[in-house]
Image (cartoon, rainbow, N blue to C red):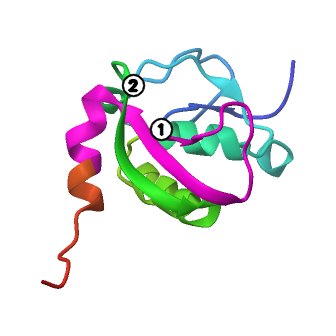
Amino acid sequence: MSEDPLVCPRCARTYSAPERFCSACGMPLVFDRGSERQASDRQRKARKIKPQYAEGRLVTVARAQNQIEAEFIAGLLLEEGIPCVPRTSIAGYAPVIGQREILVPLSGAQAAREALAWDRPG
């Protein structure tokens, strides 16, 4: 039996060995490996996504002039819990330069538009 404490993967509460489920959220407990096991970048991003914004077909909510701008927009949307996919106009080819459409699931489209809205000079 491992001597590592058990931890809830959702709320990070620690428990002793006889426990099997988190008393706060009901998640099955896992062994805490401390700094050995760091969440991957993909896992950290997935934790930020709000499920209510991840349903439906993909719709275009914005356009980016290049890859850097597309990544910036993707980061802004992720901070709001909205998943997105940048897509180039050339299928299967992703050059660094060139326009990209920013696609989000339909359930998150309105929230994405609001998150990206800003006052433009008239």
Residue sitting at x 54%, y 57%: 70
With respect to residue 64, does 92 lie above or below?
above
Residue sitting at x 56%, y 16%: 28
Residue 117 is labelled as: none
Residue sitting at x 54%, y 65%: 69
CB within 8 Å, label 2 to label 1 = yes
SS assignment at label 1: loop
Q: Is residue 113 left or right of residue 6?
A: left
Residue 80: x %, y % from top left? 35, 52
Q: Amino acid at mark 2?
A: Cys
Residue 35: x %, y % from top left? 81, 51
Figure quadrant of the C terminus = bottom left
The residue that disc 1 covers is: 11
Figure quadrant of the N terminus = top right
Could you classify mark 1 by the number of other residues whose Cα lies within 10 Å: few (under 14), some (14-19), or many (20 or more)?
few
Can residue 38 be seen?
yes
Q: Which residues are magenta?
A: 83-112
With respect to residue 90, does 62 lie above or below?
below
Residue 51: x %, y % from top left? 36, 27
Mark 2–mark 1 Cα distance, whole angstroms, equals 8 Å
Residue sitting at x 23%, y 63%: 117
The residue furthest front is 90
Q: Amino acid at mark 1?
A: Cys
- The answer to which of 108 and 3 lies nearer the viewer is 108
Magenta-span inclusion, residue 90 = yes
The residue that disc 2 covers is: 25
